[in-house]
Image: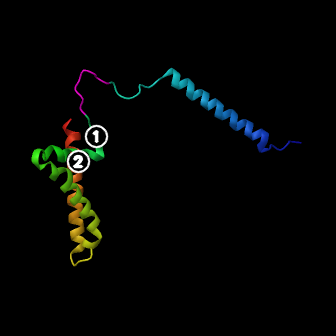
Amino acid sequence: MEQEKRFYPDYLFEIVLVILLTLELVICLALLFPKPIGRMIDFTAPYQPKPEWYFLWLYQLVRYFHGPYIFVGTVLIPVTAVILLAMLPWLDRGRHGRLAVIAVAGVLSLGFIILTLIPLLGN
């Protein structure tokens, strides 16, 4: 007559054994084939900060609006874009509202995409 297996201690022992063997395998592979961490740094090169991709459009605006017009590129254009995005529900209520929303969203999206891709494709 076959004895019925119970979760504790029979199945629990098997599960813990598989977990420990898997952990041992992962540790052995990590020690045998270590991956380099990060990118190599050239300390002789001048520092060139590069923002994350979602901030690239703002840095591109700063490059186009420099000097006395920096307020336009750093404050007026981003704030105007946020205000237009917040106004989209109210723009949709008019007779040609859906077209206005599509146009505003399209222009903002296209501007974001173009200003983000320019520095990415330039390097």
Question: Which circle's residue, 1 or 2, is located before the other in the chain?
Answer: 1
Taking the image as shown, residue 109 lies to the left or right of residue 5, namely: left
Helix, strand or loop at label 2? It is: helix
Q: Magenta region's main secondary structure?
A: loop
Near mark 2 (Cα within 10 A), the count class, few <14, some 14-19 or many ≥20, is: some
Q: Residue 51 shows which numbered tag?
A: 1
Residue 43 drawn at (x, y percent): 28, 22
Q: Where is the N terminus found, in terms of image quarters? A: top right
Q: Are marks 1 and 2 in contact (CB under 8 Å)?
A: yes
Figure check: 110 above or below 41: below
CA distance for labels 1 and 2 = 10 Å
Q: Residue 58 shows which numbered tag?
A: 2
Helix, strand or loop at label 1? It is: loop
Amino acid type at mark 2: Leu
Amino acid type at mark 1: Pro
Figure check: 25 above or below 86: above
Q: Is residue 1 magenta?
A: no
Extreme-bottom residue of the structure: 95
Residue for point 20% across, 53% down:
75
Q: Which quadrant of the figure has residue 39?
A: top left
Residue 99 drawn at (x, y percent): 22, 70
Extreme-right residue of the structure: 1
Figure check: 59 above or below 35: below
Residue 117 drawn at (x, y percent): 22, 45
Residue for point 56% across, 23% down:
28
Residue for point 20% across, 65% down:
103
Residue for point 78% across, 42% down:
8
Q: Which quadrant of the figure has residue 23?
A: top right
Which residue range is magenta in the image? 41-48
